[in-house]
Image (tube, helix red, strand yellow):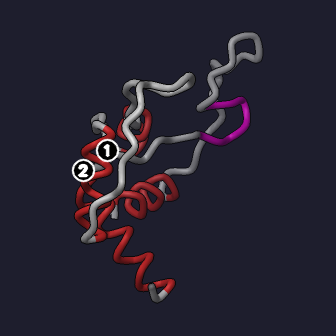
Amino acid sequence: DDIVEGVIRVSDRPATPNPEYTADAPDPGTSNAPYRVFNIGNHNPVPLMDYIGAIETALGTTAQKNMLPMQPGDVPATYADVEALTDWTGFAPKTTIQEGVAKFIAWYRGYYKV
């Protein structure tokens, strides 16, 4: 629901060129062309085990986990920074990981009939 709402809100406010954009120090979210890049997600980090738990709950099963230490390239914490989206549209996504995963899995099962 948040993704759809975010896309609609962005579509209702077309991007404009960023007059402060410079190729010497580019901002990857803007350009001197009329486009913007936005994250649409919950503005809070979610521990990996909580994410796995949400998947397990939605599927009604328990994953077989092989616990390993952090691997090269693993990111200890990350989240969708939605500040640019909120500044541009006034919209801040609120769907929790549990709700989003459950809805996605329900959609997937229905769409693919699995």
Of residues 81 and 48, the one drawn nearer to the viewer in this rendering: 48
Residue drawn at x 73%, y 36% is 33
Residue drawn at x 50%, y 27% is 74
Q: Position of residue 69 (x, y in %)?
A: 41, 26
| Separation (CA) of disc 2 from disc 1 | 6 Å
Q: Position of residue 112 (x, y in %)?
A: 51, 84
In this rendering, position of residue 49 left or right of residue 22: left
Q: Crowding at label 2, few (<14), some or many (≥20) Cα neighbours within 10 Å?
A: some
Q: How many marks?
A: 2
The amino acid pointed to by label 1 is: Asn
Quadrant position of residue 15: top right
Q: Which mark is residue 86?
A: none
Residue interval drawn in magenta: 30-36
Residue labelled with disc 2: 94
Locate the C terminus by quadrant. bottom left
Of residues 45 and 49, the one drawn nearer to the viewer in this rendering: 49
Residue labelled with disc 1: 42
Quadrant position of residue 35: top right
Task: Identify whether 1 is placed above or below 112.
Answer: above
- Whether residue 75 appears in magenta in the rendering, the answer is no
Locate the N terminus by quadrant. bottom left
Task: Identify whether 77 is placed above or below 63.
Answer: above
Q: Position of residue 53 (x, y in %)?
A: 25, 53
Quadrant position of residue 5: bottom left
The amino acid pointed to by label 2 is: Lys
Magenta highlight: main SS: loop
Give SS at disc 1: loop
Residue drawn at x 61%, y 39% is 16
Residue drawn at x 26%, y 56% is 54
